[in-house]
Amino acid sequence: MRTLTGLLAPEVIQAMVGLLEAKDMSTAAHTWRVVLYTRALAEKAGLNSEELERLTVAAALHDIGKIEIPSAILQKPGKLTEDEFEIMKTHTILGHDRLLRMGEDDRVVLDLVRHHHERFDGLGYPDRLTGDRIPVAARYFAVIDSFDAMTSIRPYRKETGVGAAEKAIAELESGIRTRYCPGTVEMFVSMYRTGELGWILEYFNDNAAVPKFSGGIDVAGARKNLKG
């Protein structure tokens, strides 16, 4: 089932994300937050509704390859061994290949799922792309994904909130031109400092109920309703 733009329908995406949540419950709120961060940045950049929908789907499905990663690795409370990390890294290719088998052909979706762990200096995975060779959506999403990982509950870390956010911002800025594209970090940090992203961190934390996925998320409306 697909939308008018040819993308997978929200109910299909919800079902796929549900499979991943069954293996790793920390994924639920993470998926919702990165979708909201992605749309907030895309709206700030002035992208049109079709581009917003494509990025929303891509963000929601970015970790879908983890369905095929053993639960013992996904939920391990300590640091992964070298062999375990090599297995974890395959989730980008596994997700990309799963979407291809399902008939997904949107380049934005496929590229973000495959390349969101590439690094600006070429030391990322799976294809060790560098700089501008990394698809634009994946460059921006790498910053979003990293920030959320550093500000949410994980088996190996419990700190959240403003304190965790400040540490995460410092990590993002220290990673400019090594891990991250300069412009992507600058935009994200600017939006965070002006209060345009803090509401996501506050209201969609790991203790909050997670809504169902919808391709037509209205970020401005969601923020207004929460604040009101």
Image: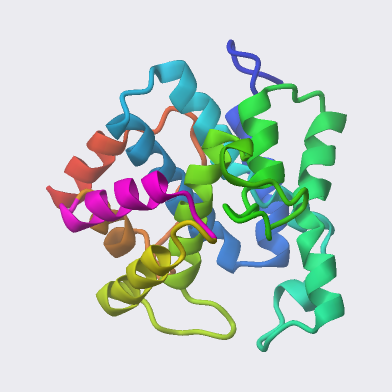
Q: Which residue is at a point 38% across and 53% down the rendered structure image?
A: 185
Residue 68, picture quadrant:
bottom right
Say if the magenta span includes residue 184: yes
What predominant SS class does the magenta segment belong to? helix
Q: Using residue 220 as the reference point, say whether residue 22 is left or right of it.
A: right
Vertical side of 162 occupied by 119: above or below: above
Q: Using residue 113 as the reference point, say whether residue 176 is left or right of it.
A: left
Q: Which residue is at a point 36% across and 59% down the rendered structure image?
A: 204
Q: Is residue 169 visible?
A: yes
Bounds of the magenta span? 179-195
Q: Residue furthest top?
A: 4
Q: Is residue 8 visible?
A: no
- Residue 60 percent across, percent down from the top left: 57, 43
Residue 179, picture quadrant:
bottom right
Q: Residue furthest left?
A: 228
Q: Which residue is at a point 73% across and 51% down the rendered structure image?
A: 128
Asked whether 51 or 225 is in front, the reply is 51
Vertical side of 178 occupied by 75: above or below: below
- Residue 205 percent across, percent down from the top left: 38, 65
